[in-house]
Image (cartoon, helix red, strand yellow):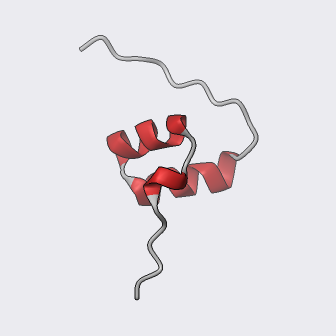
Amino acid sequence: MTNVPDESLLPCILQEIAELIGLPATLKLAQHYGGVRLYVPISNC
């Protein structure tokens, strides 16, 4: 049995971020900036 977290347990915004940058990077981001409002600009490309 692996110790891989279930993405469906994440809040919606973190699920969206995980789709863009992957689950491992999202978890690192949440661990580092958890509880802080973080603004990410939207690209119009």
Which residue sits at x=66%, y=53%? Answer: 32
Determine the residue located farthest toward the top in the rendered image: 44
Location of the N terminus by quadrant is bottom left
Determine the residue located farthest toward the bottom in the rendered image: 1
Above or below, 3 against 39 in this view is below
Q: Position of residue 30 (x, y in %)?
A: 61, 50
Which residue sits at x=45%, y=55%? Answer: 7
Q: Position of residue 10 (x, y in %)?
A: 55, 49
Location of the C terminus by quadrant is top left
Above or below, 20 against 22 in this view is above
Side of 43 where 36 appears, left or right: right
Which residue sits at x=47%, y=79%? Answer: 3
Determine the residue located farthest toward the front in the rendered image: 8
Disc tally is: 0
Q: Position of residue 22 (x, y in %)?
A: 36, 52
Q: Name the image quarter holding residue 17.
A: top left
Determine the residue located farthest toward the left in the rendered image: 45
Q: Name the image quarter holding residue 11.
A: top right
Which residue sits at x=55%, y=57%? Answer: 28
Q: Is 11 in front, or is 29? A: 11
